Image: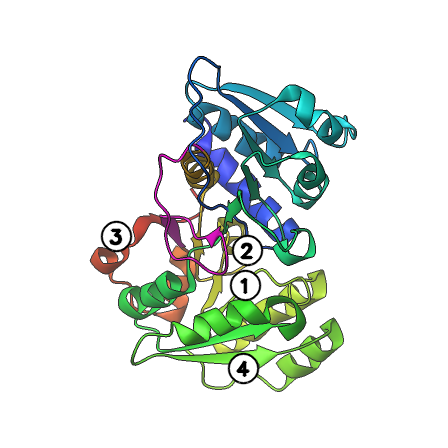
Amino acid sequence: MKGRCGRKYRWGVAATAVVIGILVLGAVPDLLMAGQPQKALILLSLRIRPYEALAEEMIDEFEGYQTKVVYLDEDPRAPSRIPKMKPSVIVTVGQEAVRTSIPYRDGIPLVYTMVLFPNQVLPEARKGISGIAMIPSPEKQLRILKEGFNLRRIGLIYNPDLTGFLVEHFESHCPAGMECEAISVRSEGELLKRLKSGLGGIDGLLLIPDPTVLTEQGIKTIISTCYEEKIPLIGFSPMYLSLGAAFTLSVPEHVIARQAAGIATNTNGKEADLMGNLYYPKSCEIHINPKAAERLGFDVDQEALEAFGVVKWGEQ
């Protein structure tokens, strides 16, 4: 697909802005209806370049479908016209898009992406509603850190009221010989106070998409603390390399688009269910910061890393 290298950075910006790490896709019924054209409605919360890039990838992946892309900020009444549009499947990008679509879907399979906290917008009855996370599964991330970088004690800073469920998933999937040290904070002030006391004996600090932690001042202080204590900082987007991260574990937009379309059309399998119909992407990219690797001297097992995904030195 054209222009992917440029899109990876935009995708990282969007990932951090939305701060989530957690997007959803799941199994949907068979959509094939003989004699009728298959239609895919792609509804975006905003017309911003990262969302547009994801939509472009989705259009390519919905081969054989009639695709219609609608921007909610330009056409706020679009969800109310879903019954007239009669799409075979709905794919949403952003929290507002899924929230406003649900009342009008009337059983139409819906796949949503770029949603920070699904539980805040999803109904209790979720039949036909599914999605995909925007970060690699906790189990995969921890195995990469252990087998590819020989890191054994990983720190996670989080707000238990927002991302506690995700940290629990990391802890429950921690491989033998590894340890997850969860550092709980409920405000930026508490975060900054905690960082003043240092990060202790962890081998690496793994960022997760938590808005309490990833404030401007919060990320600046995390970066400076890791630099002073010579602790590798691990980001979830290549954009963190330019900020000083040692390496990143991320999912490019074309992977999410492919899996979203695959699950929506019932042609793609799933991997590592998180909760309900929330699935993790099937593959990831590992970007390594050459300067950080030289400064910190951490181990890099290229062969082991390549078993988990694409390995790149630098952002591109």
Tally the numbered discs. Answer: 4
Q: Label 3 to label 1, Cα distance in Å? A: 22 Å
State the extent of the magenta-drawn residues as a range.
265-287
**SS of the residue under disc 2:** loop
In whole angstroms, how far apart are the C-alphas of marks 2 and 3? 22 Å
Q: Secondary structure at mark 3?
A: helix
Mark 2 lies on residue: 21
Name the residue nearer the viewer: 194 or 56. Answer: 56
Judge from the rendering whether residue 240 lies leftward or rightward of residue 174; answer left or right. Answer: right
Q: Which residue is mark 3?
A: 306
**Amino acid of disc 4:** Leu
Task: Give the residue drawn at x 65%, y 82%.
Answer: 194
For the residues marked 4 and 1, what is the alpha-carbon distance in whole angstroms? 16 Å
Q: Main secondary structure of the magenta part?
A: loop
At x 23%, y 59%, the residue is: 304
Relative image position of residue 213 (x, y in whole percent): 65, 67
Mark 2 / mark 3, whichever is N-terminal: 2
Answer whether residue 273 is magenta in the image: yes
Residue receiving disc 4: 199
